[in-house]
Image: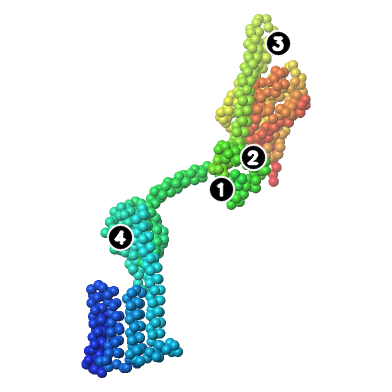
Amino acid sequence: MAAGLVFTLATLIYKQLFRTDLANPVADIISVLAFVGAFLSVRQGKPDLSLNIVFFIPLISYFSYLADFSNSNPPAETLFSAMWWFIAGIFFLAFYSAVNFRFVLFMASGLVYMVYHIFEANQSDRFFSAIQNFSDNPLTGMVIAFSGATLVRLSFDKRYNILHEEQLSFERQINETFQTVKQPLVQINASRDHAGNITLLQIEKVNHAFESQFKMPFQEAKNQELNYLFGLIFKNSFNWNDLFILNPRQQSEIYSPYHDKWFNLNIFWFNPYICICIFYDVSQEKKELKALKETRDRYMALIEAIPDIFFVIDREGTYEDLVFKGQSDLRLEAGEIIGSTIFDVGFPKNMSRKIFECIHRAIDNDSIETIEYALEANNTTLLFEMRLARLNDNAVISIARDITRRKKAEFELEKAKIRAEEAVALKSRFLANLSHDIRTPMNIIIGLTKLLAEPGLSDFEKEDFIHEVSIHGYQLLSMIDNTIYLSKIETNTMEVGLAYCNINQLLRDLYNQFYPLMPDNRDLQLKMSAAIQAEEVGFETDPVLLRQTLHLLLENAIKFTNEGIIRFGYNNKGSSTVEFFVEDTGPGIPEDEKENIFLRFYVIEKDRTAQKAGAGIGLSVAQHFVALLGGTLNLTTEVNKGSRFWFELPLANPKGFMRIIS
C-alpha cells in the first residue's frame, strides 16, 4: 500500500509539472485518496478494510475515460483499458480476499460500468448484437476473468480449508496427546535453512508429566535450546543434536546418571518443523532384565557345570532344543538333532517307543519319568539315565546323565562286596581252621612230652617221640610264619632285599630241611633237580623270599601227595631268565578250582572233608612273593596225575649260567 501511495503521488506530481496534456487532477486525486485510505487501514490493523480500495476503480475509470474534463482518448478507444482495470481489481481481490459479498459487488459494479462505457462509446450495436464476435467483446473478457478468478479463489479456499482443518486436527491431536499421555512429553520446533538443514531446535511445549518427572516448569523450558536444556536436566555429556540432527534415530535408550534411571526415547516428526519426544521410564524393566540375565547366567553356569545332556522334546517326540557337552564319544551335533525326532536320531526303535510313552505320561500326569538305556559309541557301550519332567502342555525337559562309570562302579562294588563277604567267610573259616591246626599239633606235642617224662622208655621210643615233637613243632612254626607273612602283605610292609643267591646251595638246604620231615607212613620220595652241576651257580635276587616261596610250594606238595615223587629245582631258560619249579604226583587240582586255588583262605572242599586242608594261605603268600621277585606263579595240573607249580625270574648279575655272546 505504501508503494502504491508513493507511485500515485509521484504520477500526480509528474503529470502536473511535466505532462499537463495527460493530467487529470480529479482521477489522480481519487487514486491518491484510495491509497491513503488503504494505507491508513493497514496502519490501524484493519487490513480487510483496505481491500475496499478496489471500489475506487469505477470512479477512477469514469473520471479518467468518460468525464467531460477528461483529456484521454474517446470512449470507444478506452473500453479495453477500463476492462483491464477491472480485471486487475478482481485478481487483486481474489488474491487477498475470499469470494464474498464484496467480491460479487465489485464484479457487478465492473459489469455495470462496462455496459455504461459501451453505451457512452456508442458501441452497443457492436457488442450486444447476436452476430457479434464475442472474442473481441470486453464484457466477454471480464466475465471470463471474473469467472476464472472466482474458480481459482474457490479452489484455493477449498484447499486452504482442508489444510487449515488438517492443521487444526494436528493441533488437537497434539493437545490431546499432551493431556492424555502419562509419560514425559516434549514438543520441539526445528528451524531450517534454505537447504532444509536443521539450524536450531527449541522447546515449544512440555506436559505435566515432564514437569513432574524432571522438575522443570514449562515457563523455564519454553523456547530453550534443546541440547542445553536436556543437558541441564540429565546432567550427562550426551550430544542431543547428534540424536536429532547428525544421526537421527526414532528410538533410543538414554541413561540419566542424575536420576539413576533408563529412558526409552521415541521421536515422532509430524512435519519438517515439529516433532514430539516421549520419554518412557524403563528402569524397572532394565532391573528386571538384569535380574533375569543374572538368574539366567546362574542357571547356565549350573547347566555348564553339570555334565549332562539337556533336551526339550515336544509331544510328538521332536527335539526343540539341546544343550550337549561332555560326551565326545557320541560325536553328535546340535544342528543334526534339533528338528529331528527320537525315532530318527539317538535311540533304537524299542527304546524310542518307551521314551515316547514316558513323554506323554510326564505331560498328561505332570510326573517325573525315569528310564535307563544303553547306546553303542566308538566300540563301547555307554549307559544313560534319562529323567523327563513336564515343561508345558506340549513339551518336556529331559536330562540324560551318563551313568556308565556309576554302573561299572556299582558292578565292581557288588563284586568287591561279594569278595569281601567271601573274604570274611574265609577269614572266619581260616580262624576256625587255624585254631584246629594249632590245637592238633599242640596236643600231640603236649602228649608226647608227657610220654617222654615216663620212666622205662627205650632209646628208640624216645628218639621216635622226639622226632614227632620236632615235626609238629615245625608245623606250628610254619603256620605262625605264614600268618606273619600274610599280615605284612596286607599292610604292604613286605620288603625286597636284593643280594647274591647261590641257588644250588639254597636247594640243598631245602632238601636237607624237608628230607627228615618226609612222613614214614607214605611211600613218598623227595628229589632235587639242579640244571647246572657246579659249586658256584647263582644270581641277584632276594634269597629269603625265594627260599620261602619254594618252602611253601614244597610244604604244599608234601601235604597233599600220598605216594610217588616230589621234585623241585630249576631250569636254565636262556641268558635272561631262570625257571624254578615244584612238581608232585598227587591227586591234582580240578579244572574248576584252578582259578580259586590262589585265593586267600580258600580250601578245596574235598581236602577239607579229608582233613588235609590247612589255613588256605600258603599258595596265596607264595604267589605274592613271586610277584615281588618279578615273576608270575603258574600252575599246570591234571587230576590223579599231579601238579606242577613254576615261575620264571629275571637273571640279574648271574654266575655259572651259560651265556649267549652276540
Lower position in the chain sequence, tag 3 or tag 4: 4
Disc 4 packing (10 Å; few <14; some 14–19; many ≥20): some
Q: Quadrant of residue 575?
A: top right
Image marks 1 and 4: residues in contact by CB distance under 8 Å: no
Q: Is residue 654 left or right of residue 162?
A: right
Return the residue nearer the eye: 123 or 160: 123
Q: Residues within 10 Å of mark 1 (few under 14, many from 20)?
A: some
Q: Residue lying furthest top in this view?
A: 455
Residue 460 disc label: 3
Vertical relation: 41 (above or below) 407: below
| Quarter of the image with the N terminus in it | bottom left
In three-dimensional space, the C-alpha distance between marks 4 and 2, rounded to whole angstroms, equals 69 Å
Q: Residue at x 70, y 18 (%)?
A: 611
Q: Residue at x 47, y 46 (%)?
A: 296
Labels 4 and 2 touching (C-beta < 8 A): no
Which disc is residue 229 wearing? Answer: 4
Q: Three-letter amino acid code at disc 4?
A: Leu
Identity of the amino acid at label 3? Phe
| Label at residue 321 | 1
Residue 308 on image: x %, y %: 55, 42
Mark 3 Cα-neighbour bin, 10 Å: few <14, some 14–19, many ≥20: few
SS for tag 2? helix
Mark 1–mark 2 Cα distance, whole angstroms, equals 20 Å
Q: Amino acid at mark 2?
A: Lys
Position in image of residue 571 (x %, y %): 72, 34
Q: Are marks 3 and 2 in contact (CB under 8 Å)?
A: no
The residue drawn where x is 58% and y is 32% is 497
What is the three-letter code of the residue carrying label 1?
Asp
Between the residue at mark 3 and the residue at mark 4, the CA separation in whole angstroms equals 134 Å
